[in-house]
Image (spheres, grey):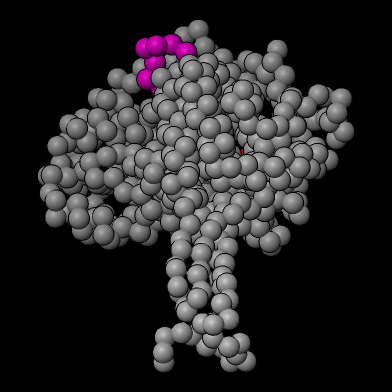
Amino acid sequence: MRQTTSWIDGRPATTDSTTSGPRRSPVLDPSTGEQVAEVVLAGADDVDRAVASAVRAQVAWGELSLARRVNVLFSFRELLKGAADQLARLISEEHGKTVTDAAGEVARGLEVVEFACGLPQLLKGEFSGQAATGIDVHSVREPLGVVAGITPFNFPVMVPLWMSPVAIATGNAFVLKPSERDPSPSLLLAELWQRAGLPDGVFTVVQGDREAVDALLVHPDVAAVSFVGSTPVARHIHRVASEHGKRVQALGGAKNHGVVLADADLADAADQLTAAAYGAAGERCMALSVAVVEESVADQLITLLAERARAVRMGPGSDEGTDMGPVISAQAKERIEGLISSAEQEGATLVVDGRGARVPGHENGFFVGPTLVDGVTPQMRVYQEEVFGPVLDVVRVRDLAEAVELVNANPYGNGTAVFTSSGEAARTFRRSVKVGMVGINVPIPVPVAWHSFGGWKDSLFGESHVYGPESIRFYTRGKVTTERWPHRATAPAASFHFSGDSGR
Ligand code: NAD
């Protein structure tokens, strides 16, 4: 069986060198319920060793020329492309999503690497010649030092790649704490960084759970923390890391509404909603989990959605014919099925019921079938909680205004979409929703890598979104130099008074 360890100072941390136990945790294949790996969980002293190695490595890395740093990024891009298939299979085995979907996740991560390859252009400073007589002013952005990334189970490659390429390109050392539920792809990433020529210690992995996270949050040598995960943990991370003087961006959970107006192409909207609700078994922070439908077309849309939900091919992620794999764990399955039951008890109608789903030959897999729930109201638990499973709620509304009110009253604000053929309605929706990422006839509006990704309200704590231009600022700090080379003949005399040079 695979043993997945931390990666410190350019090599796997041996079990003997983990002085904190070591504690271990099983990694399961969600399609079979069988153990495929064991992860060695880091303790606070392992985190200390990891950060110490990162501190040492960052000094030289931060001093290396932009051209040399970017060369490593270009090599990493090639190696990542070459390893895409291997990564996708590993993701699928530990996460359960289909190999094709996992390949898509690698491709979206690759985009961020490509963005970071443009660093020399992105990091150009600003210069004001002759800002005052004989004085030039220039601004540059410098690395923070050691930064940490704490990532969720649902994108074990893409989310680390939302953070690490930009953090590293801008001259920082990056310490990754991946999810303990699918930890192995992070080690393959570490090997690829090393083969690309990244000096040891600049990319470090500490495997672990809350113990490792808490050690990172209070570590005096960690300058910034990027977190992606559930809202309660995001809130905790933001509070504790901020209290310890760190820059923090903490992305949380979601409840994304897909609004279907009566003038939409209903067949297309049903196709898009089905894929966005059940793809990756609903375990995406941008999954559409609520269909908000204008009453006049609700029955028609539900008929289309039900046909499509029943046609979803459920099975192990490694089978080519599979549309939707299992959920991550037996506990997740139990929690999701409990929420479906609560909807039924609270008066909703289960149009398609995915409880008790079985896949022949995979009886111990953690499968939940596609579920379609009609007559959902905002008071029901299935609406209030993030289900993070293959469950699509249908809420009926009178019109666009009521749809917008519903979206805006929700505490989350990650993503949303509207399906319509009216430009005017789309524009009203786009301008009035209090949500960070909006799709117009696009169900999952994850921005391309040269825009930044982030939600509003309980979906993000801190002000910076991830990747794209905002990440360049997040991983650097400004330095402004005001410069004067006095010529005795022309320079103004030294003054005791604070003054400008505008002639006023
Ligand atoms: P999670 O919050 O349980 O775990 C995320 C990370 O935090 C993991 O590395 C985990 O080990 C660590 N962690 C868990 N509990 C902790 C605690 N009490 N203290 C400190 N660290 C802790 O999330 P998950 O189940 O791995 O991922 C699913 C969640 O992530 C969903 O809520 C989903 O919406 C969210 N998510 C959000 C985005 C986004 O961009 N907003 C993207 C992906 C996933």
Q: Quadrant of residue 183?
A: top right
Is residue 29 found inside the magenta-colored segment of the image?
no
Q: How many marks?
A: 0
Q: Is residue 368 left or right of residue 332?
A: left
Residue farthest along the top direction in this orientation:
361
Front-most of 15 and 362? 15
Q: Quadrant of residue 32?
A: top right
Magenta: main secondary structure: loop
- Magenta residues, as a range? 318-326
Q: Is residue 173 left or right of residue 278?
A: right
Q: Ligand 1 lies in which image quarter?
A: top right
Residue at image x 50%, y 7%? 361
Q: Position of residue 186 (x, y in %)?
A: 61, 28
Q: Position of residue 241 (x, y in %)?
A: 67, 56
Is residue 325 found inside the magenta-colored segment of the image?
yes
Location of residue 503 with respect to 376 vertically, above or below: below
Residue at image x 52%, y 22%? 79
